[in-house]
């Protein structure tokens, strides 16, 4: 037996935090880290946000869990608020992103099934995608490293290269049920799907009578400076999976759909024990109180500009370390010339937390509540780390 009773599935940093305050994480011996990882885009309002703490505390004193055998008023309220603020008419609550995707996939397949087209059950996905770690979502993501060793792949996914509209057109067959895409690939390395591409996807779906499913698990809930990333392209999906930011740190996901797309999701065809429980709903509603508040998203956009200006200077100043920066809102990435794991480590040595992503990118995903001063501090840490990395590169 190895040293720990835990599965060895995570390569964890040797750090344990005792508490969090806004954009900061603090170890038990008082060392402070500036958190530009935000639990991988989860702590949308930072740590210990007073409104979230109050909402969860108040609910915890009243009722934790009843199951979906009964009405859950907080669930109806959060569902209505999500519907009011999006394309959606219907919402199903889950505990995670992968479960929200499972629901999205099932919704799309059932839509065609109840319309008398059961053969339409295949979903086109995009290379570099990440949709979760369940058997269906690793098949949807199509990444070998996540599929290997887990037996037969779940069937029904056809993958096309990123940004290739011709390949997408050619992949559509009479068996196609839907196209599934992240408007901004997170794990894939902060890769933005161009607005024109999203519009072309919408158009293709309309022309072929197939559904557009968006995975906004990472890029949704204000992360890109709009409530949902697809709003920048002026299009609407038929189905959308969300999670991460909507719970602000409480496990919460949701699948949103139009009335039409949800026609197959009738009584008994899908379910969950924990999904939409009163605790999660109290927090989800509290997150929306803040994110939908006056000027909140304007601030995200203003702070994005500040951070992007700083990143442009950083990339110019350290060409041996960084190739470019990319992204939108507060979902940004530094494409590195050195190994992104080494850059992430160098940032951590300066007490700045970030997340590596695909395509040799370091992801910068601060809380949406990050202050101007914290952005300046983070940029200073990145500069200090880059100076050291450049020196190592020259000495080597
Ligand atoms: C775009 C996207 N979809 C789905 C998931 C899966 O979410 P979860 O880990 O909550 O199952 C993630 C998680 O990183 C994600 O980034």
Image (cartoon, helix red, strand yellow):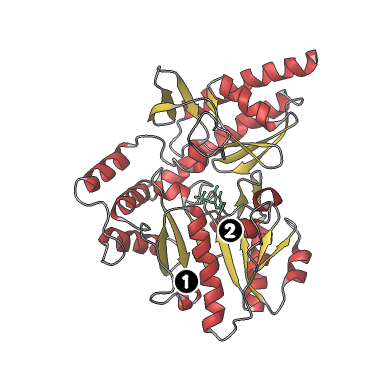
Considering every residue shown, the one lying at the far bottom of the view is 116
| Observer able to see residue 238 | no
Q: Nearer the viewer, residue 228 or 177?
A: 177
Image point 48% across, 58% down: which residue?
99
Image point 55% across, 33% down: which residue?
306
Image point 34% across, 37% down: which residue?
49
**For the residue labelled by badge 1, is the local secondary structure a helix, a strand or a loop?**
loop
Q: Tell me residue 121's x, y (percent).
A: 62, 74
Q: Nearer the viewer, residue 200 or 156?
A: 156
Figure check: 73 above or below 279: below
* Foreground: disc 2 or disc 1: 2
Q: Tell me residue 355's x, y (percent).
A: 58, 35
Figure check: 319 above or below 116: above
Image point 77% across, 25% down: which residue?
320
- Quarter where residue 393 is shown: top right
Residue 329 tag number? none
* Quadrant including the N terminus: top right
Considering every residue shown, the one lying at the far front of the view is 1
Decide which of tag 2 and tag 1 comes sooner along the chain: 2
Q: CA distance from mark 2 to mark 1?
A: 26 Å
| Observer able to see residue 155 | yes
Tell whether 323 sits left or right of 357: right
Q: Which residue is mark 1?
A: 258
Q: Which residue is mark 2?
A: 135
* Quadrant including the C terminus: top right
Q: Tell me residue 281's x, y (percent).
A: 32, 54
Tell whether 159 sits left or right of 349: right
């Amino acid at each position: 037996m190895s040293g720990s009773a835990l599965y060895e599935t995570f390569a964890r940093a040797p750090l344990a935090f005792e508490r969090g305050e806004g954009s900061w994480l603090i170890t038990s011996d008082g060392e402070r880290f500036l958190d530009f990882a935000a639990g991988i885009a989860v702590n949308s309002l930072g740590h210990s946000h007073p409104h979230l703490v109050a909402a969860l505390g108040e609910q915890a004193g009243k009722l934790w869990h009843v199951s979906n055998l009964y009405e859950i008023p907080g669930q109806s309220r959060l569902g209505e608020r999500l519907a009011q603020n999006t394309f959606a008419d219907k919402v199903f609550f889950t505990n995670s992103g992968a479960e929200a995707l499972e629901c999205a996939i099932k919704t799309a397949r059932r839509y065609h099934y109840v319309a008398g087209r059961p053969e339409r059950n295949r979903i086109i996905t995009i290379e570099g995608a990440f949709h979760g770690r369940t058997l269906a979502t690793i098949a949807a993501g199509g990444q070998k490293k996540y599929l290997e060793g887990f037996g037969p792949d779940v069937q029904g996914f056809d993958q096309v290269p990123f940004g290739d509209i011709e390949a997408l057109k050619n992949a559509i067959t009479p068996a196609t049920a839907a196209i599934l895409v992240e408007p901004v690939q997170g794990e894939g390395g902060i890769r933005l799907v161009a607005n024109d591409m999203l519009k072309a996807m919408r158009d293709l779906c309309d022309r072929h009578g197939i559904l557009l499913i968006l995975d906004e698990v990472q890029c949704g809930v204000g992360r890109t400076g709009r409530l949902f990333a697809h709003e920048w392209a002026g299009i609407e999906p038929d189905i959308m999976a969300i999670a991460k930011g909507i719970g602000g740190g409480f496990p919460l996901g949701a699948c949103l759909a139009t009335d039409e797309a949800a026609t197959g999701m009738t009584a008994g065809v899908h379910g969950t024990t924990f999904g939409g429980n009163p605790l999660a709903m109290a927090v989800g509603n509290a997150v929306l109180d803040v994110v939908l508040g006056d000027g909140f998203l304007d601030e995200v956009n203003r702070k994005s500009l500040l951070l992007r200006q700083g990143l442009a200077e950083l990339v110019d100043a350290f060409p041996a370390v960084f190739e470019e920066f990319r992204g939108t809102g507060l979902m940004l990435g530094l494409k590195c010339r050195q190994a992104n794991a080494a850059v992430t480590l160098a940032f951590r040595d300066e007490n700045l937390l970030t997340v590596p992503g695909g395509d040799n990118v370091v992801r910068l995903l601060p809380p949406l509540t990050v202050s101007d001063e914290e952005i300046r501090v983070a940029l200073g840490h990145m500069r200090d780390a880059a100076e050291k990395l450049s020196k190592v590169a020259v000495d080597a």
